[in-house]
Amino acid sequence: MNAERMADLDAFRDMIDAAERIVVFTGAGISTESGIPDFRSPGTGLWNKIKPIEFQEFVGSDDVRQESWRRRFESKDSNWADAKPNKGHLAVAKLIAHGKATAVITQNVDNLHQDSGVPDSQVIELHGNTRYAKCLSCETRYELAELKAQYQTLGRVEPCSRCGGIVKTATISFGQAMPERAMAEAQEATNACDMFVVIGSSLVVYPAAGFPEYAKRLGAKLVIVNREPTPLDGIADLVLHEEIGPTMSYVVGVN
């Protein structure tokens, strides 16, 4: 480990020590070390292998809905049930547990922050959660094990048993409106933070990527930990183009 890199890591640690209200913002990069592929990387991203289904296609066609469920229950690329939190997730959980961080704003849908020990109330999911499903009309929650059993028995997922509405995984699809409550919670957390830490996000997807910009304008320190450069590197107080797990575990102190 060279001296310049060590100096950056120590500077990051000092910034964390000095902060009182950290907001952590995570993207796909934090979960790739848990074996979950990202969606957009050239050549390797999931959307390079499978064309994403637009929200309007999903709600407009039963055939498209059943294809979506087929992908969910039959394709190995979309099932991450065995994924476990890695050292990056555990470092974030430690920041929350010690009261240094107030919230985790995440673009991920994998539930790994909750699995790492972050209370659900402190995880703000901008793109939803792939671990369960909801009726789009009455918001009745459905567990995926129940829907998978139905799919294996009937070859399809039926409409909501309560109101007849469309049942969909609780993720935000292309063309679907961002969740108002989550966006408001993310804005509130950003307003109150004195340090904003981006981990594993390319910062190209808006409106989510607007939060670190806004935090910086309000005077918060901005740190970006990502393997590749991002459009916001130029305004950050510190940028680390490093592997996330080793970096975060060193800075936060996770074995």
Image (cartoon, grey):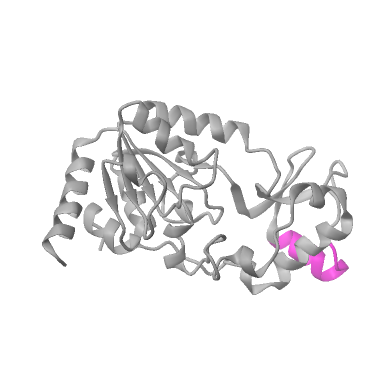
Q: Position of residue 213 (x, y in %)?
A: 41, 35
| Placement of 32 over or under 55, stated as above or below | below
Q: Position of residue 30 (x, y in %)?
A: 42, 58
Tell me which corner region of the image, top left, top right, bottom left or bottom right, holds residue 16.
Answer: top left
**Residue at 46 percent of width and 47 percent of height:** 203
| Placement of 217 over or under 70, stated as above or below | above
Q: Is residue 183 left or right of residue 8?
A: right
- Span shown in magenta: 145-156
In depth, the one of 214 and 165 nearer the eye is: 214
Total count of labels: 0
**Residue 15 colored in magenta in the image:** no
Q: Quadrant of the N terminus?
A: bottom left
Q: Quadrant of the C terminus?
A: bottom left
Q: Is residue 183 left or right of residue 157?
A: left
| Placement of 32 over or under 161, stated as above or below | below
**Residue 151 colored in magenta in the image:** yes
**Residue at 20 percent of width and 54 percent of height:** 9
The single residue placed furthest to the left in the displayed view is 3
Prevailing secondary structure class for the magenta stretch in the rendered image? helix
In depth, the one of 86 and 108 nearer the eye is: 108
| Placement of 106 over or under 211, stated as above or below | below
Q: Position of residue 178 (x, y in %)?
A: 63, 38
In depth, the one of 184 and 97 nearer the eye is: 184
Q: Position of residue 228 (x, y in %)?
A: 38, 59
**Residue at 36 percent of width and 58 percent of height:** 88
**Residue at 54 percent of width and 57 percent of height:** 110
